[in-house]
Structure formats: C-alpha cells, structure tokens
Amino acid sequence: MDDISEILKYLPHRYPFLMVDRVTAFEPNQSLKAFKNVTYNEPIFTGHFPQSPVFPGVLILEALAQASALLAFKSMGGYPTERTLYLLAGIDKARFRRQVVPGDRLSFDVSVIREKRGIWKFDARASVDDALACTAEVMVARNELEEE
C-alpha cells in the first residue's frame, strides 16, 4: 500500500530511527498493518549483542508507536506540516513474547482504542511469522511545534 517514500511524508523520523518500511493495510480511524525488515546491517547490532544479535524491545515499542502515529496521521487526511508531530505519550501493558533477530520481518498491527482531543490510544501488536513478539497499549499525542 504505502512504500517508504509515502511513509516519509507522514513521519519525521529518518535513518537510523525510522522503524516502518511499508504499510500493507489501512482503514481510517480503525487499523493499520505495516512491517519492518530487521537486518544485521542495523547499527544497533554492533552492541546488542555482538555474539547473539537481538533487536531491542524498546525499539519494537518505538516501531509500534511509529505505526500508531501513521494510523493517526493518515486518518486525519492530508499530510502533516513540518511543525506537526505525534509524540509518544505512554506505553501500558507491554509484554515481550519472543526475540526478534536479524532476518526477521517484524509485522505491526495497530488498532484504535479511542481518540480524544488529539490523544490517541491504540492496541498494538508486533509479530514475526504470525508468532506474537510484543503486545502493548500505545498512546500518542498530537503536538504542534512553536514558531521560532
């Protein structure tokens, strides 16, 4: 559905912190499916852990937050301005169920729990080959940067 060039129009993140490679399904105000290809070339693996590389859980949560922000932005219609951000406001009920390693395709499935005054709450799941890797409730809040 959305390739990387389209994702870059919605998210301000850039290498090495952009965690969504492609959007595969989208229902406005409902749900979004996306994925990230985890490769050994990522800078994080030089230190986490060289003898047995594991993609950090905190980055899985960041990826789920980015997928959630994508769902919020896309649901609003049109592209955000350079001054509009969705910031991570909270993570609840996070659970890690399997390790993610180089060569895995990390799939994201986020769905809206509620939205109120620019604060969105999502049910977020990350999986590899249909095996659940992480679940969490993710909150993101719309933020407009002040003029300088």
Image (cartoon, rainbow, N blue to C red):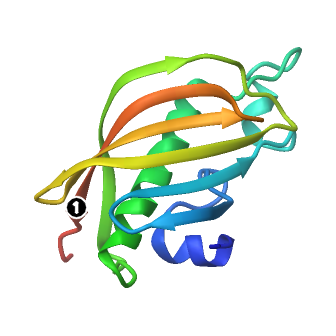
Residue 78, relative to residue 139: is it above or below?
A: below
Give me the residue at 61% from left, 16% from top.
Answer: 97
Where residue 144 appears, as percent x and y from the top left, is 21, 68
Where residue 18 appears, as percent x and y from the top left, is 60, 55
Specify the quadrant that holds the C terminus.
Answer: bottom left
- Name the residue type under label 1: Asn
Give me the residue at 47% from left, 72% from top.
Answer: 10
Give me the residue at 34% from left, 81% from top.
Answer: 77
Farthest residue, direction bottom:
78
Q: Quadrant of residue 85?
A: bottom left
Q: Nearer the viewer, residue 16 or 128?
A: 128
For this view, does 4 lie left or right of residue 113? right
For this view, does 71 lie left or right of residue 87? right
Residue 18, relative to residue 63: is it above or below?
A: below
Q: How many marks?
A: 1
Give me the residue at 68% from left, 59% from top.
Answer: 21
Q: Count neighbours of disc 1 (C-alpha within 10 A) and say few if under 14, some if 14 to 19, many if 20 or more.
A: few
Residue 55, relative to residue 50: is it above or below?
A: below
For this view, does 13 lie left or right of residue 120? right
Specify the quadrant that holds the N terminus.
Answer: bottom right
Q: Nearer the viewer, residue 88 or 25?
A: 25
Mark 1, residue position: 143
For this view, does 51 lie left or right of residue 110? right
Q: Quadrant of residue 127?
A: top right
Farthest residue, direction left:
117
Where residue 71 appears, as percent x and y from the top left, is 42, 61
Q: Quadrant of residue 86?
A: bottom left
Where residue 136 appears, as percent x and y from the top left, is 42, 29
Local secondary structure at mark 1: strand
